[in-house]
Image: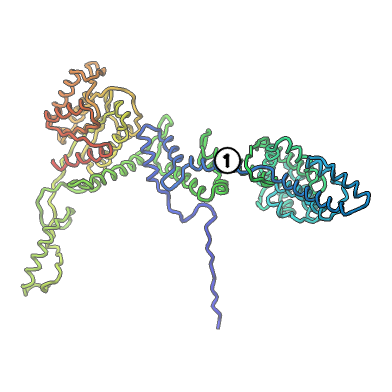
Amino acid sequence: MARNRFHRSRYRRYTGGPDPLAPPVDLREALSAIGDDVMQGVSPERAMREFLRRGGSSTRGLDRLAEEANRRRRELLKNRNLDGTFDEIRELLDSAVLNERKQLARDLDDDARFAEMQIGNLPASTAKAVQELSDYDWRSPEARADYEKISDLLGREALDQRFAGMKEALQGATPQDRQRIADMLADLNELLDKHNDGRATQADFDEFMNEHGEFFPEGPETIDELIDALAKRSAAAQQFFNSLTPEQQAELAGLSQQAFGSPELMSALSRMDDALRQARPDLNWDGSQEFSGDQPMGMGEGAAALRDIAELEELAEQLSQGYAGAQMEDIDLDALARQLGEDAAVDARTLTRLEKELRDQGFFRRDADGSLKLSPKAMRRLGQAILKDVAAQLSSRGGDRRADLAGRLGEPTGATREWAFGDTEPWDVTRTLTNAVLRTVGEQGDPSSDTPTALGTSVRIDVRDVEVTDTEARTQAAVVLLVDTSFSMVMEGRWTPMKRTALALNQLISTRFRSDELHLIEFGRLARATSVDELTGLEPRMEQGTNLHHALLLAHRHLRRFPNAQPVLLIVTDGEPTAHLERGGEPFFWYPPHPETIGKTVRELDHLSRMGTQITFFRLGDDPGLANFIDRIARRIGGRVVAPDLDGLGAAVVGDYLRARRSR
């Protein structure tokens, strides 16, 4: 009997780049935040950059990521110092001298006394002491072992600065291991010389990697990738040397000659550094850092810390996006993951996708002058989001209906009728259920019924029971929204709520009540007709004057174009009229309001009222002069006055429009 074989699968975290199963990015939050900034007068380009800097509710922005990169850099400088290798060498030297003194004290010959004098007169400089002892004939095996560790440590540290993992890999290295390193350095220098002379080929690189690939765990595939990796480490080693004090630099220069017991290693490394500097002169070879902590680092660790610091500085610059031609694609996601963790790279990748999707899906367009604008698609999405917020406010008020349902059907007449095939009117549930119950009761005692029903069974609705709400065609309305754009609207924080209100009303009429006409007029020192796109991007105007008279003239002219439509006028303002239009077309401004200004404004309101216009004032703020003017004029023309708070302005305007439609 064949044995069943089971295949075991092991599942790990996906590491092959962006998650192919990740859900698409949600653009709603980004578009809402960008729209709010645009409505405050910020350009769309800057608004998008500001969103990327701030981030979203679940994604860190560029500013926070840059702050974390700078904080990590400061921690490296604050907590570390470069004394590690010097301290370790000094400890080995002190241990060797102590063990040698003990051995010499036990020896009674004259050579021992001479050796004691030599040991006792060593220079205070560690480097000079190590150099003087290079030819010393050690009597203590322990002392000789400690001294040999110094040259071995120096060699491993020098290599660890330039090749990853060398310090640990060469611990206890044999002469054969050291010879292999010498051969690798010789071949590497030859390859670098060929590259700098323009003679290196891919075959030369492949031959080198086949012979010495074990020393390069990064796995470079071209000579340029190899040089990039080596040059960054070599530049960090030079920065390590630059960061030392002059005394430490002198000590290190003297000690380096003892690496592996001969100056040949440092000579080969120096030749390699020169070739790499020639190949990559753009790296920061002359930089340095000020370490001030109490955690000592060795030469290899110090160079690695300096590489991290350099990488963090590059990341901070990339995340700042403050240089000319900056793009989100400039951010090195691999470096970000190394320095700040995988979550940071995920956040940056999400922001990059958000920006790309916003551009690719057509939420922005270029004007003829090259400036970036919100596209009609973006305006519709903004309007939908704002109208949804307004609908939520309306639904929480007693007696109001959901704005997102308004306009789908005709207006109810109050009567019902029997359903007929093809009807789309809503059911009258009360009449339908009543018909079903009466029919059921009637059929219980009717023996001729095809479906006799026992007493107590459930009621079933038959098509004969259904009655629908009778509706009538809507009456077309010509709606004019006047919005105050004077200086006070900006100063009192009413600028953005005013724009959101216009967007919400435009979205409602354009999608639910398409037979109605909406016209927007903005008024400050002067008035002018505008579109919802222009109003959304309108920058704050630091001009005084509330020329309601001019706005009413434009509204009157527009309403006369629709003689068969119901005229509706909605006025959003926070100040009494302080300007009017002169005969020559020039604005006249005076504060407090001039009697002529008041007179001309009232005259235009009277004209609109005689046309049968439904007029509603939305009074913002607590200006007593405005309140007195609006209350008196509303009584005069039979208009309405609404005094909403800023958060409820949109709901107030949309709700009043819906109320006016129900009353027609």
Residue 146 at x, y = what percent?
A: 79, 52
Give the quarter of the figure containing the N terminus: bottom right
Q: Position of residue 141 (x, y in %)?
A: 84, 56
Residue 279 as seen in the image, left or right of residue 390: right
Residue drawn at (62%, 42%), measured in percent from left and top? Answer: 293
Q: Nearer the viewer, residue 289 or 413?
A: 289
User: Which image quarter: residue 279?
Assistant: top right
Q: Is residue 307 left or right of residue 266?
A: left
Going 42% across and 43% down the picture, which residue do you hit?
358
- Quick check: 62 above or below 432? above
Q: Is residue 620 left or right of residue 435?
A: right
Left or right: 587 as drawn, with respect to 68: left
* Residue 525 sits above or below residue 73 on the image: above
Residue corresponding to mark 1: 74
Point out residue 491 in the picture as x, y percentages from the top left corner: 32, 28
Mark 1 is on which residue type?
Answer: Arg
Q: Is residue 411 among the parts visible in the rendering?
A: yes
The quarter holding residue 531 reads top left
Identify the image quadrant of residue 506.
Answer: top left
Q: Secondary structure at mark 1?
A: helix
Colouring style: rainbow
